[in-house]
Image (spheres, rainbow, N blue to C red):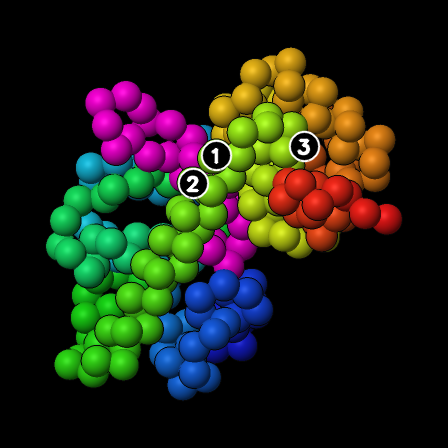
Amino acid sequence: MPERNRVQNCAALLQRGWLSFQPEPFRQRVIECVRLQAFDPGGTIYGLGDPPGGIYGLVRGTMGVSIAPGRAGPHLAHLALPGSWFGEGSFLTGQPRRVGLEAVTPCVLAHLTIADMERLVGGDPEVMRAFAQIAMTNIDLCMRGIEDLLIRDPIRRVAAVLWRTSGGQRGIEIPMTQAELARLANASRKYTLSALKQFVGLGLVRQGYHRIAVVEPERLRRFADDDGPGE
């Protein structure tokens, strides 16, 4: 792929998320190595327990992230937006996949193989630290999710989950049903429906068919934090 087209196709990865915070020379080396892959809705990027296989950056679309830390599951835990990266755990530990990734909408992902990651590291601790930053980003995301689910009030809990899945970005449309939102927020359908009606009335979100758009992310976060939605 010509270099100009490659950079254009990976623009989302250079504008937000882990790679956008890396030094320019390293960003360029990563973009030169990635291979773009397309997935239809429902397509599995990798499953829980799969062997190691490098990292994936979401260029376009929405991915579902599933977990199964106990005997139950897998459970949908998060919806990832462009700029997100996953798969670093297998590179850092050499162990099987701890989460599963599935395309919710048509998706394009950039895949960086373990072989290319090892070649990029080449004994350079700074590059290893750069890859380890993906893990820290995802740990932060995990802790945010735990904090969301510790909110006792179900209406506020739904608000927190909507904010997290939107990445705090204005106008982001989240492809999910009310039932999926209820599961993500660990709330009943009754409370989830009540929350959505309240948020629409306050102008915080806009609802469509199997889609929820976050219109006012800052006010939604204040609502989740029990500070009131503001004006």
Report the residue that reaches farthest toward the top: 190
- In screen coordinates, is 89 left or right of 67? left
* Residue 142 belongs to the span the image colors magenta: no
Q: Amino acid at mark 2?
A: Ile
Q: Which residue is mark 2?
A: 146
- Between the C-alphas of marks 2 and 1, the distance is 5 Å
Label 2 crowding class (10 Å Cα cut-off): few <14, some 14-19, many 20+? Answer: few
CA separation, marks 2 and 3? 24 Å
Q: Amino acid at mark 3?
A: Arg
Dividing the picture into quadrants, the one containing residue 54 is bottom left
Q: Can you identify the residue that label 1 sits on?
A: 149
Question: Pointers 2 and 1 in contact (CB under 8 A)?
Answer: yes
Task: Residue 52: tell me if it is visible.
Answer: yes
Of residues 15 and 103, the one drawn nearer to the viewer in this rendering: 15
Q: Which residues are magenta?
A: 58-85
At horizontal 17% and vertical 80% (from top left) the residue drawn is 122
Give the labeled residue for mark 3.
211
Viewer-nearest of discs 2 and 3: 2
Residue beneath the point at 59% across and 40% down: 160
Label 2, secondary structure: give it: helix
Q: Position of residue 195 (x, y in %)?
A: 70, 26
Q: Position of residue 30 (x, y in %)?
A: 37, 73
Q: Position of residue 191 (x, y in %)?
A: 64, 19
